[in-house]
Image (cartoon, rainbow, N blue to C red):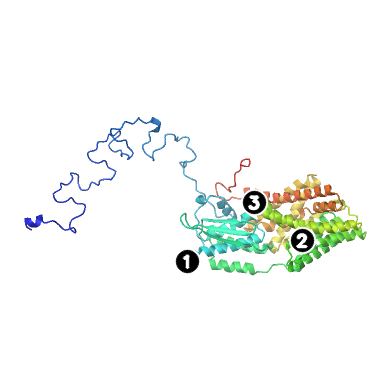
Amino acid sequence: MTDAEDRKPQSDEARSGFLPPIGVAAPSEPDSSTTSEFAVPEGLAVSRTGTESEATSEFAVPDGLDVAPPHPAESEGSAFNRPSTYSAKRPPPAFTPPNGVPAVSLTRDVPWQDRMRTMLRMPVTERPAPEPIQRHDDSGPAVPRVLDLTLRIGELLLAGGEGAEDVEAAMFAVCRSYGLDRCEPNVTFTLLAISYQPSLVDDPVTASRTVRRRSPDYTRLAAVYQLVDDLSDPETHVSLEEAYRRLAEIRRNRHPYSGWTLTAASGLLAGSASVLVGGGFLVFVAAAVGAMLGDRLAWLCAGRGLPEFYQFTVAATPPAAIGVALTVAHVDVKASAVITGGLFALLPGRALVAGVQDGLTGFYITASARLLEVLYFFVGIVAGVLTVLYFGVQLGANLNPDAALGGDPRPVLQIVASMALSLAFAVLLQQERSTVLMATLNGGIAWVVYGALHVTGDISPVAATAVAAGVVGLFGQLLARYRFASALPYTTAAIGPLLPGSATYFGLLGIAQNEVTDGLASLTKAVALAMAIAIGVNLGSEISRIFLRIGSPEKRRAAKRTRGF
């Protein structure tokens, strides 16, 4: 190559845009030294207070500018330096502890209800990541279908009488079983909603479902619990299609007991209740016949589309009419025991316990709606019985409020009657046959505890009722955890012997006889007994958690309140 060719300028393809042009002296530094855009330009003198290795901040004071030296406590060179007010011995709570945030570990050998309740009480950011255990394709489960399945399961549980907290736990368990962790279920009295947000930057997906009708079918409730348990079991894989198929079978299944069987159970319940308050064989038959007539009239009204308020009003009329008729005919029976037995078959103990339980667990809207429903039912019963008692008093019926309480204690007969009452109550709730025996025994134990405290120990009936209901709730929860099922079949029927039927009747009779003060006092006692039952059942359920190992270091979080603030 000649000298002329050497002096010819090179093309752009052969020369880099970062090379110095021909004729410009290259810098003295080697080519490997990369210059930072934050480096100090050449020719600018900067005084350094530290070593040469310290980086110069872009907020440094230029030379020639007089600035007062900072206070020694405020000399923080970088935002990443430890603040001067920080003490390693007494760190503020805002900083992460040296050992880090403790991980929450939930063991799998406890019922899924307790694990789901524990996670629902946690903030979303502290919940452990789910492990999808259900089979689906590589693209993941269809989120709308998972949410729809969750809502359908929650609908059956809420319609069956389950508490709002347990319904939310079941819905959360279904979502986590398919890998949806950022879910927030919401349960009210008639509306179910669930929201799923894939991430912090994605739009949430929300679905809702309305509960139009309620029917106490504990057999269906147990089947739904079994489905949720299978979905939460890591060794049992249930696809979405299989879950939908099983749910459809649960909805199509008929009730285990026919209508006439339920009518006979109503009669047995009323007759057993009349024996508990001092009635004999004739009183038993009269109360049973009155309750069966009321049940058939309620079925007739339901077939005509009348609301439940009028159904309760009509159902309360026959037992009261039979008791008044026997008194007017001067038959030597305790009419008060007949009417009280009929009231036992109508008092909404299931809805009352569920309403108080929702209120104690923080679901105040649902609790208010349930208790308002109980109030409407109670007003319907009052309207039916009070109308009959008013006409009976006008006809000259000599109704003695103390007649139902007379007689010597009959512990053996009353224990048998309490167990028969719980058996009838379990049939009315459409329970599985495998749970009827345990519910019957639990009801007998409840009456034994109540009799030992009130009759033998001369303790207040309200306190004795609360303790007996607590024993019912404790045994019910332990049995439910042993069988991984709902506690309602073991507790609702067992509280039947404790319902305030006699106090309700005495209050209505006092009002009918123009003794309003005594009547309101008896009705207040009935309300106190009902609240004692509900609070006792819930307290027994909470005490049972002491004996259960949930697996979380913080157990079950609850809302912390300080003097109402």
Q: Position of residue 471 (x, y in %)?
A: 71, 50
Q: Is residue 519 left or right of residue 7?
A: right
Dividing the picture into quarters, in which one does residue 156 lie?
bottom right
Dividing the picture into quarters, in which one does residue 186 lie?
bottom right
Name the foreground residue: 381 vs 89.
381
Dividing the picture into quarters, in which one does residue 245 lie?
bottom right
- Residue 523 to residue 73: above or below: below
Task: Quickly name the residue at label 3.
Answer: 364
- Quadrant where the image shows the N terminus: bottom left
Kind of residue at disc 2: Phe
Q: Residue at x 68, y 69 (%)?
A: 254
Secondary structure category for the residue under label 1: loop
Residue that extends furthest to the right in the rendered view of this protein = 330
Secondary structure category for the residue under label 3: helix
Name the foreground residue: 299 vs 532.
299
Q: Residue at x 25, y 41 (%)?
A: 41
- For the residues labelled 3 and 2, the Cα–Cα distance comes to 26 Å
Task: Quickly name the residue at label 2.
Answer: 312
- Residue 544 to residue 254: above or below: above
Q: Position of residue 502 (x, y in %)?
A: 81, 53
- For the residues labelled 1 and 3, the Cα–Cα distance comes to 41 Å
- Contact, CB < 8 Å: mark 2 with mark 1? no
Q: Which mark is residue 137?
A: 1
Secondary structure category for the residue under label 2: helix
Crowd band around label 1 with a 10 angstrom C-alpha radius: few (<14), some (14–19), many (20+): few
The first of marks 3 and 2 along the sequence is 2
